[in-house]
Image (cartoon, grey):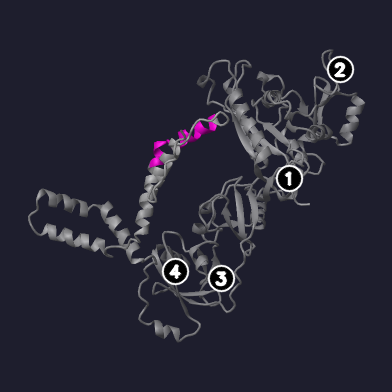
């Protein structure tokens, strides 16, 4: 006999419907796993609770609820006052305690606000002489509502007239959002207090101390500047900036602090000296002041001229491993030629071409399947041993990652194959390639020459992601739109002294003989020098605690490069 299907009543709720549906699920040979999954989901107790809550809310909504009264907090105060006027029983004391508790008072206050639909800020009454002030057509009264945020405007004293003038409106601030205050407006009063004879710092303090609402008496500028659309220019900061330490800033409180590597959205460059910018990722909508590129370069040039800043054009002490190749196994296996240490004649995209590190314009870039993979460049400070890190990651994923095969003049060993370990060439061929500028870096070791060519990198990039480790000086040659290098600075975690770690274990993992305190100090100094000279070109710093964790972190970076977008110089994507 065929079983009858249960019938739902018109008033059945969602949780009842769900329960009935669950009871009708029967295992099926073709969809057994699906049925079991659905039955487990529908039988979940938390889902049933959610359905009941939903029904209760819908029932309450259909009742079109209205507030019983619009002043619950006032009534609670009256009741509390009545209770305190006479002797109280235990229940009355408990009621008084509830009515006077901060949490209940806050709830009742919110109830009254919603019931009265009184959501607008409360402004103070207009001044008594408001009508008289309006007789002068050029005067306008501006009333703004602000919380603890700054007003978002700076002022200056006009040297010719002595008037207090609005010098700058910060994008996204209270003044900017109001649309009522403009650059060039003359400020006469703040909350009824005349500012005509006050100093700018006194006026700024008066503005900052005003909370809630603030009333300004303003004489509008004769010609109000058009409100510009927000700029979409993004800059990578190449230096740290602390406004409170900058005596040149027109308003330290309005300054925007940032660190090297931060991405800044420059919203206006109207002022050639002070730009307005926001840090990408900040929740604060108000822009802040930052020194413009031209202004920052000029004052750095002045400091060089006065001798308080080293000249960036003077030769630097290279952070190379030329001082020795054998010591403790920490240094690279060949020495770079002097030509490479001083830079290459190749077409590099180095923000340092302007001599001073200020800003580099950037944009978001997402790797497309039709493009060659980005070049991954590893640089390392002393003791990082980046070659073993590179080789480990490549050996784990040889179908996705590869290394550019270097050239050498040394004889081929019996077990070696041409084009696998090395490209074996004659000294004459190698010297010719050097003259033709085919190497990104080259050097010699034990009377043999070694070098990594541009063509070797291109050959790998045609089919896989290429990972190279180079001396930092080679970055100038590699920073091009063709390679779009992602630069990773690897440095070992260096303990304060060798007593802090196991004897015989070198920083960064591995066992390469006893490391002295002198070695550790040299490694720390190497990391500092590399960061100072090349840190502005680095996309990621990888602290190498041990080989396993460093490999895991590097693998994660390589995978994200294939699917996520990154900030790159605009010249790399503009054609």
Q: CA distance from mark 1 to mark 4?
A: 46 Å
For the question of whether residue 318 can be seen, the reply is: no
Q: What residue did someone put label 2 on?
A: 411
Q: What residue did someone put label 3 on?
A: 183
Q: CA distance from mark 3 to mark 2?
A: 74 Å
Q: Secondary structure at mark 1?
A: loop
Query: Residue shown at 48%/64% (left/top)?
Result: 174
Observer-nearest residue: 81 or 349? 81
Mark toward the viewer: 1 or 4: 4
Which quadrant of the structure image shows residue 418? Answer: top right
Q: CA distance from mark 4 to mark 2?
A: 80 Å
Tag of residue 144: 4
Observer-nearest residue: 256 or 243? 256
Mark 4 crowd level (few <14, some 14–19, many ≥20, 10 Å Cα)? some
Q: CA distance from mark 4 to mark 3?
A: 16 Å
User: Which stretch did the figure color magenta?
Assistant: 32-48
Residue 173 magenta:
no
Q: Position of residue 37 (x, y in %)?
A: 50, 33
Query: Residue shown at 82%/41% (left/top)?
Result: 346
Observer-nearest residue: 242 or 71? 71
Q: What residue did someone put label 1 on?
A: 350
4 and 2 marks in contact (CB < 8 Å): no
Dot 4 or dot 2: first in sequence order is 4
For the question of whether residue 396 can be seen, the reply is: yes
């Amino acid at each position: 006999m065929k079983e009858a299907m249960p019938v739902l009543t018109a008033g059945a709720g969602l949780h009842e419907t769900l329960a009935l549906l669950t009871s009708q699920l029967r295992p099926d040979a073709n969809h057994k796993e699906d049925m079991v999954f659905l039955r487990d989901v529908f039988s979940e107790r938390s889902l049933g609770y959610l359905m009941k809550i939903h029904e209760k809310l819908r029932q309450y909504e259909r009742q079109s609820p209205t507030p019983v009264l619009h002043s619950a907090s006032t009534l609670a105060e009256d009741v509390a006052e009545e209770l305190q006027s006479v002797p109280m029983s235990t229940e009355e004391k408990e009621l008084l305690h509830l009515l006077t508790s901060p949490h209940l008072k806050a709830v009742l206050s919110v109830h009254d606000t919603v019931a009265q639909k009184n959501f607008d800020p409360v402004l103070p009454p207009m001044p008594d002489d408001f009508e008289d002030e309006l007789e002068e057509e050029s005067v306008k009264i501006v009333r703004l509502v602000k919380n603890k945020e700054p007003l978002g405007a700076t002022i200056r004293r006009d040297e010719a007239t002595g008037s207090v003038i609005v010098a700058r409106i910060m994008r996204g601030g209270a003044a900017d959002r109001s649309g009522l205050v403009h650059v060039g407006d003359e400020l006469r009063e703040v909350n009824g207090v005349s500012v005509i004879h006050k100093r700018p710092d006194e006026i700024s303090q008066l503005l900052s101390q005003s909370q809630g609402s603030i009333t300004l008496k303003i004489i509008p500028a004769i010609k109000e500047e058009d409100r510009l659309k927000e700029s979409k220019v993004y800059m990578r900061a190449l230096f740290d900036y602390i406004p409170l330490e900058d005596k040149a800033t027109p308003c330290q409180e309005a300054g925007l602090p940032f660190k090297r590597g931060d991405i800044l959205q420059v919203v206006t460059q109207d002022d050639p000296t002070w730009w307005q910018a926001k840090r990408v990722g900040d929740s604060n909508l108000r822009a802040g002041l930052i020194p413009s590129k031209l202004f920052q370069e000029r004052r750095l040039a002045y400091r060089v001229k006065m001798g308080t800043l080293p000249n960036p054009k003077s030769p630097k002490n290279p952070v190379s491993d030329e001082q020795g190749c054998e010591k403790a196994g920490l240094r690279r296996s060949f020495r770079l030629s002097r030509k490479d240490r001083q830079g290459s004649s190749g077409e590099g995209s180095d923000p340092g071409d302007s001599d001073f590190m200020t800003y580099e314009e950037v944009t978001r870039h997402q790797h497309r399947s039709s493009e060659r993979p980005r070049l991954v460049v590893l640089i390392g400070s002393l003791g990082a041993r980046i070659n073993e890190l590179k080789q480990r990651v490549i050996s784990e994923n040889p179908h996705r990652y590869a290394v550019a095969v270097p050239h050498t003049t040394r004889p081929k060993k019996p077990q070696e194959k041409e084009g696998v370990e090395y490209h074996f060439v004659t000294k004459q061929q190698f010297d010719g390639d050097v003259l033709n500028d085919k190497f990104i870096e080259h050097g010699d070791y034990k009377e043999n020459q070694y070098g990594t060519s541009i063509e070797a990198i291109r050959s790998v990039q045609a089919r896989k992601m290429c990972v190279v480790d180079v001396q930092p000086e080679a970055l100038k040659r590699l920073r091009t739109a063709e390679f779009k290098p992602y630069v990773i600075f690897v440095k070992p975690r260096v303990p304060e002294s060798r007593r802090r770690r196991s004897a015989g274990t070198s920083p960064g993992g591995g066992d390469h003989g006893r490391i002295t305190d002198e070695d550790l100090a040299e490694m720390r100094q190497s990391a500092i020098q590399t960061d100072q000279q090349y840190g502005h070109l680095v996309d990621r710093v990888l602290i190498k605690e041990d080989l396993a964790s460093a490999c895991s972190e590097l693998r994660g970076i390589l995978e994200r490069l294939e699917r996520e977008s990154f900030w790159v110089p605009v010249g790399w994507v503009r054609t």
